[in-house]
Image: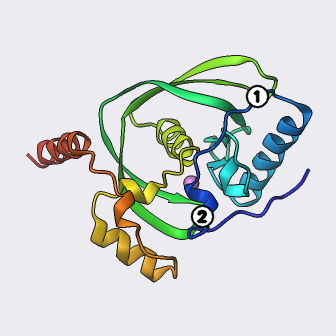
């Protein structure tokens, strides 16, 4: 077991596109286990390899609650094969200590990946459950995309980053996501009626 150092926002390695894992070797398994240990020690829900300085397409997630048994999930070479709907999500990230921002996400996703033993599996996460959001958040890390790029309100995001002494938003990285935003606004106006 090893606890790894988590890179903070501003480190260029968080913006790199990660490489596919060619073989689920003993080294890859050890890295995945160390990532889980690092995530648990830091009370995180997910952690991606680039956050510990590894340029590989691997992330780990555990969405179990405090009173539930641990449910570690390892995703190697993941691919989101289906996505639909839209939802607002208030997210943080272990690379952005204490900073939480409202972002846009798909409501439902289906992902295929290899597990820690190199076996393929498929997971579907629906209705904007935590797992659905976590899969999108972590999968983005593998392409150098960060949750703040999905911010609904750039001014709020700038303020949250400033308050937490983090580097400012990278405006050229912001995602437009017009359709997701329209769907979220529609839901919000319907819930007010
Ligand atoms: Ni993150």
Q: Position of residue 102 (x, y in %)?
A: 36, 58
Q: Which residue is mark 1?
A: 22
Q: Is residue 1 left or right of residue 72?
A: right
Q: Position of residue 134 (x, y in %)?
A: 53, 43
Residue pictured at 36% horizontal, 74% vertical: 158
Residue 107 seen by the camera: yes
Q: Is residue 115 left or right of residue 193?
A: right
Residue pictured at 56% horizontal, 59% vertical: 93
Q: Is residue 37 left or right of residue 166?
A: right
Q: How is the image coloured?
A: rainbow
How many other residues sit within 10 Å of disc 1, few (<14), some (14-19) or many (≥20)? Answer: few
Residue 125 seen by the camera: no
Q: Disc 2 versus disc 1: distance between alpha carbons?
A: 24 Å
Q: Which residue is mark 2?
A: 12
- The quarter in which the C terminus is drawn is top left
State the SS at label 1: loop
Q: Position of residue 3 (x, y in %)?
A: 84, 58
Residue pictured at 72% horizontal, 53% vertical: 39
Image-quadrant location for residue 18: top right
* As drawn, 66 above or below 102: above
Question: Which numbered circle lies on residue 76?
Answer: none
Image-quadrant location for residue 11: bottom right
State the SS at label 2: helix
Q: Earlier in the sequence, mark 2 or mark 1?
A: 2
């Amino acid at each position: 077991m090893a606890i790894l150092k988590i890179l903070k926002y501003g480190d260029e390695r968080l913006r790199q596109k990660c490489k596919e894992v060619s073989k689920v070797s003993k080294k890859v398994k050890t890295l995945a286990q160390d990532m889980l240990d690092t995530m648990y020690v830091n009370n995180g829900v997910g952690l991606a390899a680039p956050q510990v300085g590894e340029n590989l397409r691997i992330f780990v997630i555990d969405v179990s609650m405090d009173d539930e048994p641990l449910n570690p999930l390892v995703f190697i070479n993941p691919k989101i094969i289906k996505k639909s709907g839209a939802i607002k999500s208030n997210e943080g990230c272990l690379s952005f200590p204490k900073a939480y921002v409202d972002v846009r996400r798909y409501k439902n996703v289906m992902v295929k990946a290899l597990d820690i033993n190199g076996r393929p599996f498929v997971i579907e996460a629906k209705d904007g459950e935590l797992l659905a959001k976590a899969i999108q958040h972590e999968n983005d890390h593998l392409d150098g995309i960060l949750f703040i790029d999905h911010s609904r309100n750039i001014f709020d995001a700038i303020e949250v980053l400033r308050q937490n002494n983090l580097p400012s938003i990278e405006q050229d990285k912001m995602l437009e996501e017009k359709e997701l935003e329209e769907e979220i606004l529609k839901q919000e106006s319907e819930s007010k009626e």
